[in-house]
Image (cartoon, rainbow, N blue to C red):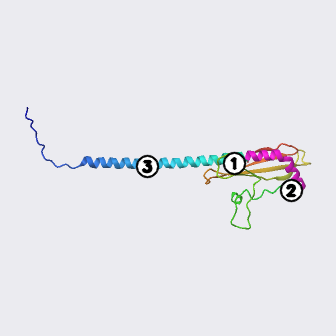
Amino acid sequence: MANSTRQAMPATRQAGAALVIALVFLLLMTILGVSSMQGTALQERMAGNQRDRNQAFQAAEAGLRAGEIYVDENLKALTELARAEGVGLTFGRFTDPAAWEASDDPDEEAVEPTFTIDKDDYGVASDVAVHVGQYIYSAPGPDLDNYEVIQHFPITARSVGGSGSTIVVLQSYCATPGDISIPLCGPL
């Protein structure tokens, strides 16, 4: 057997520089990881809010289309009612979305919608409220001597998104110039 000889290392003082450098790198990696997680959480909230808004917008858009169909199907009855009363149907206060909900003031009443669409059809937080108003006025005809009756039907739809924090209000108009029996509808 061979004798193994060991050489002793000279005793030197170590400064610990490797430990300090490793701790600095660990701190930098921690800061980078935390900021990445915060950025990801922010992007997730923004995507959720955008989805909620899109959901409410699509439900309100469907409400507008349903309102236009309502005007189309009930045009004769709406016209006869307006002629019998001599004035157009009241447009109400529903241009102000705050009036669509019950108020704490006992003198103010919430504006009732013309009809609603079930919230489960679109996955939103509350039913889609659709209001159909009516303006009737006379305008000069093509020969400027005769006046023709023009009816405008403002259609307003209000939808609340899936989380309840997003509200979308859209408005469209249908008009029946002259003796046209089919309303012309479109956005404002």
In the rendered image, which quarter is residue 62 located in? top right
Residue 10 picture location, percent across and down? 12, 45
Q: Is residue 75 magenta?
A: yes
Which is the main secondary structure of the residues drawn in magenta? helix
Relative side of 17 to 77, left or right: left
Quick one: label 3 or label 2, which is nearer the N terminus? 3
In the rendered image, which quarter is residue 181 located in? top right
Under circle 1, the secondary element is helix
Instruction: Depth check: give the residue in front, 36 or 126.
Output: 126
Name the residue at the front extreme: 1
Residue 175 picture location, percent across and down? 81, 47
Quick one: label 2 or label 1, which is nearer the N terminus? 1
What segment is highlighted magenta in the picture? 64-84
Residue located beneath label 2 in the image:
87
Residue 109 picture location, percent across and down? 74, 63
**Cα distance in 3D space between marks 2 and 1:** 28 Å
**Cα distance in 3D space between marks 3 and 1:** 37 Å
